[in-house]
């Protein structure tokens, strides 16, 4: 069978991924060298695992891994609870117009740029003119230097993430609820089921497959952080690193402000291998549950 | 239990009479279920919670707009508030008095967004079409080739060195423009959308002797409007919100930065604000720097927010279609 035209139609996309995703792969070698510009990637002296040793001994790798995973766990657990609750409540809304306006407002944070989220945080939290401090002063308190309290930021970052993604994330669960056979609800009503029983015995069980699959895939991605969000909220604020630095922000800073290509490549490689293993595991689990939902 | 079964049809009639509707039984059926106290409580809680959450989502936007309309002295004295403090348009006047920077940024971003979305959409649609064709021999290989890039990547540093140094794209808009053309996820999304086109259409085209490209451009594409709208919007949003690649590859080497990167600089660099408004002849102390940041945020975000209510439904389609496997 002749597939020449179809192959040609794929060519631009294939070329794109070759140039921007496959061609940089040999550059991973930098992780095992003492890279310098003059000698290039393969001319620079080979140092074995020295870059990784440094990362482990300094404790940085552990800190970054811990922060990345803990933030993602908080996002996954709280995010799913809120998304499911919101979807159930949206399903109770009968006024069409009300639902439409509410959804429009709730999806909005997902579509603005992360830079604007940084502006919003600045507006709310800065020491001199922040809306939050203005409120505290008005009610007779002393202003707080939020940008130097490391302990506050896990809460702020999780809150901002939930603000940004709960509305949009609830769509998948809402669609699943809409797909439930209506006769189930009728039968339940006829049998005198309470509102709670309806949620407990009809809605939650029918959301279970969606939930488990989304959960597995988000666990597969647990080594990858939301760079834009963290960077625009925290940026180069070193006092907060202990509680806010994730793999992506550390790598970006190493490349951009320290021109450190060796350590950043080593961290990146560690993240890719760890992340790849997790996705494979997640996919294996999904495949065992329901073949149709497996990625490959 | 039996009594409520017989009561139900009567309730339909009552409901129809009361509302004066002649709707189909399917639509009226849910209304016939008699609500218990628990149902009313749940419904009440739902209305209140959803309202509060929607307000919570909208609140920061009100804060930014109010702050942009406040007077600098009032903000320095009392801080930002939910309502404008000492209403004034000064910050906007500053932006539009010397609009060179912001207009330049707009031109860069609008050009990238329109051209990039058009090209990206065409390439993604072609690829999605080919990968959807069951008779395409390399279908599985190419799918995996594209998908693999999401599983394992070289990471930031090697990619940066490759694009900036070996491809020589440092300081070039192309570094930003090209890398945003497509993502594996959008190609998978397109392939999923293709399933809505009946395969018989393709078969009939083949019977009539049309080539593969003609089947794509004249038979399939016209049926793919919702898919093109959805994927086009994700592409456009990617270009419009772009700041990350600009920070890596453009830095300060271009005069006109893409809009969001321009905003990023205004917020994070002390001098950027002064340079952006009236050249260096304005003293930094005279600048309404706090309100100016907020007004710039409004100007940089504005158009996408105005467009948003009209395109919202396509985002919903995107996530529901994209949630199935690739």
Image: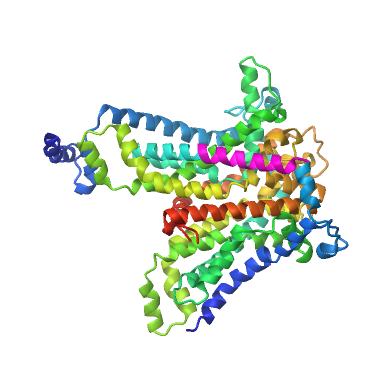
Residue sitting at x 68%, y 39%: B93
Q: Is residue A54 above or below residue B127?
A: above
Please say whether residue A61 is one of the residues in the magenta stretch: yes
Q: How is the image coloured?
A: rainbow
Classify the position of the N terminus of chain B by image quarter.
Answer: top left
Residue sitting at x 36%, y 74%: B200
Report the side of A82 relative to A186 (left or right).
Answer: right
Q: Nearer the viewer, residue A91 or B235?
A: A91
Figure label count: 0
- Which quadrant of the figure has residue B249? bottom right
What x and y, as percent, mark residue B273?
75, 41
What x and y, as percent, mark residue A260?
81, 51
Q: Nearer the viewer, residue A234 or B316?
A: A234
Please, what is the dominant secondary structure of the magenta stretch? Answer: helix
Please say whether residue A140 is one of the residues in the magenta stretch: no
What x and y, as percent, mark residue B188?
51, 62
Q: Nearer the viewer, residue A74 or B308?
A: A74
Report whether residue B98 is seen.
Answer: no
Report the side of B148 relative to B200 (left or right).
Answer: right
Residues drawn in magenta: A58-78
What x and y, as percent, mark residue A270?
69, 52
Q: Is residue B316 above or below residue B205?
A: above
Residue sitting at x 65%, y 46%: A227
Report whether residue B164 is seen.
Answer: yes
């Amino acid at each position: 069978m002749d597939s020449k035209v179809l192959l040609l139609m794929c060519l631009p996309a294939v070329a794109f991924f070759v140039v921007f995703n496959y061609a940089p792969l040999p550059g991973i070698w930098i992780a095992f060298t003492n890279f310098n510009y003059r000698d290039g990637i393969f001319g620079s002296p080979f140092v074995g695992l020295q870059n990784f040793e440094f990362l482990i001994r300094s404790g940085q790798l552990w800190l970054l891994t811990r922060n990345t995973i803990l933030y993602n766990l908080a996002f996954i657990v709280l995010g799913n609870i809120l998304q499911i609750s919101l979807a159930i409540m949206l399903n109770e809304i009968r006024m069409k117009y009300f639902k439409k306006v509410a959804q429009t407002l709730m999806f909005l944070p997902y579509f603005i740029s992360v830079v604007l989220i940084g502006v919003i945080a600045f507006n709310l939290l800065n020491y001199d003119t922040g809306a939050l401090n203005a409120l505290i002063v008005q009610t007779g308190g002393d202003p707080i230097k939020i940008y130097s309290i490391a302990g506050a930021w896990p809460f702020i970052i999780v809150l901002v993430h939930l603000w940004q993604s709960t509305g949009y994330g609830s769509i998948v669960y809402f669609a699943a609820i809409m797909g439930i056979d209506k006769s189930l609800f009728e039968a339940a009503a006829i049998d005198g089921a309470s509102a709670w029983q309806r949620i407990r015995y009809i809605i939650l069980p029918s959301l279970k497959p969606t939930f488990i699959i989304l959960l597995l895939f988000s666990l597969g991605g647990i080594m990858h952080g939301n760079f834009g969000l963290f960077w625009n909220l925290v940026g180069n604020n070193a006092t907060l690193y202990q509680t806010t630095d994730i793999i992506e922000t550390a790598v970006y800073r190493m490349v951009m402000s320290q021109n450190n290509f060796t350590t950043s490549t080593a961290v990146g490689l560690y993240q890719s291998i760890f992340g790849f293993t997790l996705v494979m595991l997640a996919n294996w689990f999904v495949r065992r549950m329901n073949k149709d939902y497996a990625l490959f | 239990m039996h009594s409520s079964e017989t009561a139900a049809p009567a309730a339909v009639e009552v409901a129809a009479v009361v509302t004066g509707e002649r709707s189909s039984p399917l639509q009226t059926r849910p209304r016939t279920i008699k609500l218990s106290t628990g149902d009313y409580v749940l419904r009440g809680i739902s209305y209140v919670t959803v309202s509060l959450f929607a307000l919570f989502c909208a609140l920061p936007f009100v804060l930014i707009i109010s702050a942009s309309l406040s007077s600098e002295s009032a903000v320095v004295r009392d801080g930002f508030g939910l309502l404008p403090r000492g209403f004034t348009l000064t910050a906007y006047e500053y932006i539009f008095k010397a609009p060179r920077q912001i207009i330049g940024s707009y031109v860069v971003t609008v050009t990238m967004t329109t051209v990039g979305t058009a090209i990206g959409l065409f390439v993604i649609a072609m690829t999605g079409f080919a990968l959807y064709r069951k008779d395409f021999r390399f279908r599985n290989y190419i799918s995996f080739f594209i998908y693999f890039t999401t599983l394992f990547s070289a990471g930031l540093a090697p990619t940066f060195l490759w694009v900036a140094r070996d491809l020589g794209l440092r300081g070039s808009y192309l570094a930003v423009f090209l890398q945003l053309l497509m993502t594996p996820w959008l190609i998978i999304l397109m392939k999923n959308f293709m399933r809505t086109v009946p395969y018989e259409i393709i078969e009939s085209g083949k019977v009539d002797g049309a080539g593969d490209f003609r089947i794509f451009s004249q038979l399939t594409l016209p049926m793919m409007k919702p898919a093109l709208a959805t994927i086009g919007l994700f592409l456009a949003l990617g270009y419009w919100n772009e700041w990350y690649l600009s920070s890596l590859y453009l830095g300060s080497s271009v005069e006109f930065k893409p809009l969001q990167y321009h905003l990023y600089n205004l917020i994070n660099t002390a001098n950027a604000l002064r340079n952006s408004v009236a050249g260096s002849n304005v003293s930094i102390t005279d600048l309404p720097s706090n309100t100016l940041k907020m007004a710039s945020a409004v100007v940089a975000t504005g158009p996408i927010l105005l467009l948003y209510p009209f395109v919202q439904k396509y985002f919903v389609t995107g996530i529901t279609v994209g949630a199935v496997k690739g």
